[in-house]
Image (cartoon, rainbow, N blue to C red):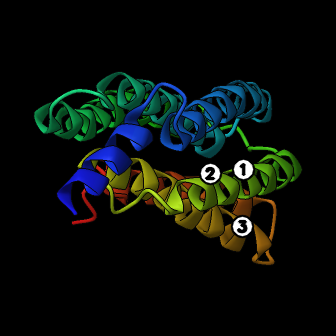
Amino acid sequence: MSNSCSELEKELASPHGPKRRILWLVLVINLVMFFVEGIAGWLAQSNALMADALDMLGDAAIYGFSLFVIQHDPVWRTRAGILKGIIMSVFAFGILGSTIYRVYHQVLPDASTMGIVGGLALAVNLFCAYLLLRFKDDDINMRSAWLCSRNDVLANLGDRFSLARPGSRGCHRRADSAILIWHFQRCPTGTGK
């Protein structure tokens, strides 16, 4: 029995195993979305899109680190989850600085760009969460990767909800701020606690 479990673990961690292929796929998807959301966020003057773009970059970094540690000891897989928390904290301070600047230099974000790109981000994050779902109980490294995608889906749903609320153009500035606060409140370490 233990021999078959050992063979299964070797297959999952092999260079050509399904776990590695999925991690590579979600890494590339997140890198592409980092550029899409980052550029769109800058053009639309949306801190929420820029925060989500940085989150995509952080996710791509953790997926890359996950690929590195997949064949290493469990302590390295645990460190991958901690790295995600550190990356998210650094990005959070950058977005916080941008938000403080925009309090004094108010610019209205473009709601239509936020809606279109936010919808694309939701679809991408749903797809990534679906791909990672079958590996979520393998170890803390894969659970952290899945939780990142799941939390991103929840954040994107919050984005969609806040943009769907009727109101004046000033409502979009509040929606952008509400979305940004949602991104800050999510669990950055991927532990689910």
Q: In the figure, 2 relative to 41: above or below?
A: below
| Residue closest to the far left | 75
Q: Picture coordinates of residue 143 (x, y %)?
A: 34, 55
> The C terminus is located in which quarter?
bottom left
* Front residue (pair 35, 138): 138
* Residue for badge 2: 128
Q: In the figure, 123 relative to 108: above or below?
A: below
User: Which of the two marks, 3 or 1, is nearer to us in this view?
Assistant: 1
Residues under labels 2 and 3: Cα distance? 18 Å
Mark 3 or mark 1: whose residue is earlier in sequence: 1
Query: Could you say which quadrant of the image residue 179 lies in?
Result: bottom right
Amino acid on which disc 1 is placed: Val
Q: Secondary structure at mark 3?
A: helix
The residue sitting at 62% across, 51% down in the picture is 128
* Front residue (pair 170, 38): 38
Amino acid on which disc 3 is placed: Arg
* Residue for badge 3: 160
| Residue closest to the far bottom | 166
Q: In the figure, 159 relative to 77: above or below?
A: below
> The N terminus is located in which quarter?
bottom left
* Residue for badge 1: 124
Say few, some or many: other residues with alpha carbon within 10 Å of mark 3 (under 14 / 14 to 19 / 20 or more).
Answer: some
Query: Could you say which quadrant of the image residue 39 lies in?
Result: top right
Q: Picture coordinates of residue 93 (x, y %)?
A: 34, 31
Is label 2 in contact with label 1 (beta carbons under 8 Å)? yes
The residue sitting at 24% across, 57% down in the picture is 191
Say few, some or many: other residues with alpha carbon within 10 Å of mark 1 (under 14 / 14 to 19 / 20 or more).
Answer: some
The residue sitting at 28% across, 55% down in the picture is 5
Mark 2 or mark 3: whose residue is earlier in sequence: 2
Residues under labels 2 and 1: Cα distance? 6 Å
